[in-house]
Image: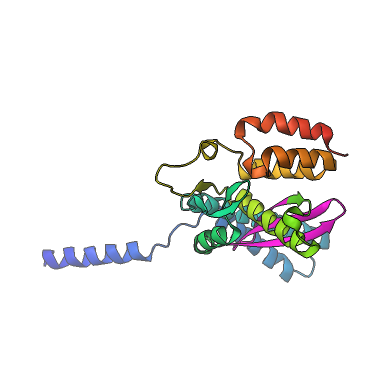
Amino acid sequence: MATKTNVVNHETSASSLQAVPAAPTPHLAESTAIIQVIERAALNPDVDIDKMERLLQMQERVMDRQAMMAYSAAMAAMQTELPSIEERGQTNNGCYATLEDIVDTVRPIMQKHGFAVSFRIQTQERGIEVTGVLMHKDGHREETSMLLPADMSGNKNAVQAFGSSTSYGKRYVLSALLNITTRGQDDNGNASTKKGIKTVTPFQAGQIQRLISQCPATTQEWFSGKYGSAVQVPYSDFDKLRASLTKRAVK
């Protein structure tokens, strides 16, 4: 009889443990509480409209904060999985990671963590502005922009120049949003001395490119002859170059 009683008590205890729901996270509990307050207020015909609007604004702030927290957590997790992209594109001024290689590499990782990216292209008097928008499934988004002159190198026509600058801008705003790094192709240790020089980050390259687009044509020609492109600027030159271009930029 004692054995039977012990079994019954054990089963009852296990059942009780299984019935206990998991404690909600603090931000979900906060959101649920506000929703319940709003629902009760909506059912009350005597509720003050101004008070209802304040409650709705409070709910929006809570939702925005939750979306930001979800974005930050997902970004932190995604960063650990993003690899360095191999530089397989080539120009006379050096190698670069192509937009196709970047997108093909990061798309499945972004999807896994609930991210998507889109671009806005706007033509302005000073050039082409490319804006990248990184969106998370919970609603938060971040964006960054890059202003570029039309790329007329290589005897391009107007349409080709627009397409080249757009592709360039997409590469670098996407790299800035995701903090992507690139690397040269494996050449069995035969890399040139120039390739071994540490260059600016994608974000710094974007800063330089924006300044260049605001400078006179003579400065742009000088820059092209010395560095080729913003991404090829040595890291050690960044501070001095940025200060110089800032002085020359047309306000």
Q: How many marks?
A: 0
Residue occupying the point 43% across, 47% down: 187
Image quadrant containing the C terminus = top right
Judge left or right: residue 80 versus residue 201: left
Give x and y (percent) for residue 98.
58, 57
Q: How is the image coloured?
A: rainbow
- Kindly indicate the quadrant of the structure image that contains residue 39: bottom right
Image spot of residue 11 (x, y percent): 24, 67
Q: Residue at x 43, y 48 (%)?
A: 186
Residue 219, quarter of the rendered image: top right
Q: Is residue 118 magenta?
A: yes
From the image, give the main secondary structure of the stretch colored magenta. strand
6 relative position to 79: left or right: left
Q: Position of residue 16 (x, y in %)?
A: 33, 64
Q: Which residues, given as a range, are shown in magenta?
A: 116-145
Q: Is residue 52 magenta?
A: no
What quarter of the picture does the N terminus occupy? Answer: bottom left
Of 112 and 106, nearer the camera is 106
- Look at 43% across and 59% down and name the residue there: 22
Q: Is residue 15 visible?
A: yes
Residue 178 lies, in percent from the top left, at: 58, 51
Residue extending farthest front:
155
Q: Is residue 30 left or right of residue 61?
A: left
Front position in the image: 122 or 159: 159
What residue sits 72% from the left and 55% below the top? 154
Q: Is residue 215 visible?
A: no
